[in-house]
Amino acid sequence: MRITKENIWDEIEKKNYLEVLRSDLVDKVINIYNWTPLHRLARYGVKEILSHPSVDKVKDNFGYTPLHRLARYGVKEVLNHTSVDQVKDNLGETPLHHFVLCGYLNREDLRNKYPWYKKEIKDILKAVEEIENTPDSVRFILEDS
């Protein structure tokens, strides 16, 4: 099947992930949220997008790249990507921040496994501390939004 801008979103829903990824439209077509098909593939946890040159370049309305989206869904392979601590969303947060904010990494993980990340470590640890000190009822609301 030929991927077109008219059918690309349907092909993702049909789970034709690799065909969509091979399409030259995967980083060009956008929806009303400025999501590209790369963003949607990230939403489904398609790790193969990590090798696409636009994975850390195309941004949605929040400034999230597909790399941010993969981090938000806990795809640990993102931690090996060169931009994990560089590309920032509209709030200045990197994919590494998203791993922490979504609870996939904790303070010990950061200290023991990721000593290479130093320039913003205090901000990340502060974020972890805020999450750890947030009452469960409020944390549920924050995670849901």
Image (cartoon, rainbow, N blue to C red):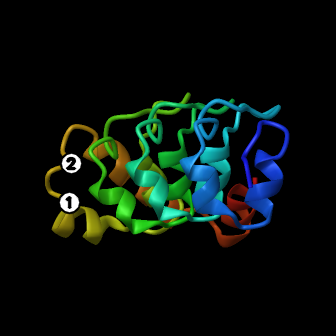
Q: Amino acid at mark 1?
A: Tyr
Q: CA distance from mark 1 to mark 2?
A: 6 Å
What residue would you read off at disc 2? 117
Mark 1 surroundings within 10 Å by alpha-carbon count, few (fewer than 14), some (14 through 19), many (20 or more): few
The residue at the point 21 percent across, 48 percent down is 117
Residue furthest to the front? 1
Q: Nearer the viewer, residue 95 or 5?
A: 5
Q: Amino acid at mark 2?
A: Tyr
What residue would you read off at disc 1? 114
Q: Which mark is residue 104?
A: none
Does dot 1 land on a helix, a strand or a loop? loop
Q: Position of residue 143 (x, y in %)?
A: 68, 60
Q: Nearer the viewer, residue 68 or 105?
A: 68
Q: Is residue 54 left or right of residue 79?
A: right
Q: In the rendered view, would you say 86 is above or below 125?
A: above
Q: Position of residue 2 (x, y in %)?
A: 73, 48
Does dot 2 land on a helix, a strand or a loop? loop
